[in-house]
Image (spheres, grey):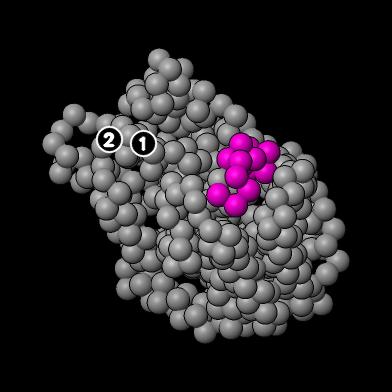
Amino acid sequence: MSENAAETMTAKATTEAALDVNKKLPVWKKIGYSFGEIGSQCSWTLISSYLTVFYTDVVGLTPVVISAIMLIARIWDAINDPMFGAIAENTKTRWGRFRPYILWGAPILALFNCLTFLNLDIPNSWKAIWCGFTYIGCGMAYTAVNISTQCVANVMTASNQERVSLNAYKGIGSGLIQMVISAVAMPMILHFGNGSASSSRGYFMAALVFSIVCVPCFWVCFASSKEIIGRKADAKKETIGGTMKNLAASFKYTFKNRDAVFLMLAMFTFLTGLFGRIGIMAYYFIYIMGDPLLIAGFATAMSFGMLVVNFYAPLLLNRMSKKYVGAMGCVAQALCCVFFYVIGQNHLTNLVVISGFLYGVTNVVSITCFTLSAEIIDDSWLKTGIRSDGVIASCISFSTKLGNAIGGSIGILALGAVGFVANATDLSATVLTNMNKVINFAPAGFFVVAALLFLCISITRAKAKENEEKLAAKIAAGELS
């Protein structure tokens, strides 16, 4: 082959690559990608909703032991999540950097999901060790598969509009499967447990069913996706020293990136308020509204609202700077909390379902975070030459877990500080009002601070579009892969 012919073929290949990274993805790929989130929900929802009950009512662990297990798990997450992200983004295989962890991690996650709900007939001290081992192991497997699934959306395309669409499809899949799981989980536990909600067999069999379902879902996601950004499939295999150098560089540039740091802080603050409120929301209905049955209507309406978000959010995210959408979402959530306070003070039970829907339908912060993080990753890549997909995504994932842990713990402490006493039937009007303030005004404060942090991010829609064009040009010139 002549030199001119080789140059022509190379130029053609790079031009096709540039077009490929920005082209519109077919619907079937987006649906296939959404199955990764369906698999994540199948593998983790049972743990997030029923594990504490399983530990107390089936295994027989004390609250102190359970708290210790959760604390150790969160400490390990602080190390494990960012480290996995750095390892994944420096992985080089013929499938790409992240997809192998979806392919091979799914069966491991399914196995640990089942083991987490396996109650062994051993002494209590060993039960605590077993529960800690299986829960932390399950969390590590979930980190590997879930973070990889998130990162794949950022490397399937360089088009920010297509990334928004991918995350919207993922959100729809998440909303649909959450409603299904909520409807069938407890009936399944009761069925396999012969009518008992404290049956070891009931929980294990339910976990087994969800685990069997999650594996093919992850594999559909794997088969439907293709990494075309930052893959470097032709790169030489690195030495251990070179890999460690890349890991250190990824962390260095991530934490020097002010936009990445502000996004992490915004999500940590928002989720501290969100999970803090979730952790004590039941007290709002039991004590302030005086009717625990209202929880079902509120939760169902909220879930439906969160499903609707994925249909209108792309219109906002593709027409506005994402930092403004995130800030507006935080403010809207704060206003909903004020609305809840008014409902509680006046016992307006007929507005509970409406308030639940409004709370769900205004929560655009999660989808904004995923799509904004992709723009920050691109911007950092152009500035530094290092694509820190895994580190940035995993650090945001850790901020989510940290917000969950801190929010859940400070909520109940705050209620105790204003005079709440469990199972009391004679709480004064002053105590109830103060409880209402803690449950609603405290999260609202966190949401407002999160809005301000979103506004501190420098990436705008114009800047993201400019970066998108620069990336296409650099890929066409063979400068990036």
Mark 2, residue position? 59
Prevailing SS of the magenta stretch: helix
Q: Position of residue 336 (x, y in %)?
A: 72, 60
Quarter of the image with the N terminus in it: bottom right
**Which residue is disc 1 drawn over?**
54
Q: How many marks?
A: 2
Q: Which residues are magenta?
A: 287-300
Name the quadrant of the C terminus: bottom right
Q: Is residue 107 visible?
A: no
Distance of label 1 from label 2 (alpha carbons): 6 Å
Residue shown at 39% from the left, 38% from the top: 53
* Dot 1 amino acid type: Phe
Q: Position of residue 59 (x, y in %)?
A: 27, 35
Say which of 429 and 271 sits in front: 429
The spot of residue 96 in percent (x, y) is 53, 54
Secondary structure beneath label 2: helix
Q: Are marks 1 and 2 in contact (CB under 8 Å)?
A: yes
Q: Nearer the viewer, residue 246 or 236?
A: 246
Which residue is drawn at the image coordinates 52% and 84% (left, top)? 256
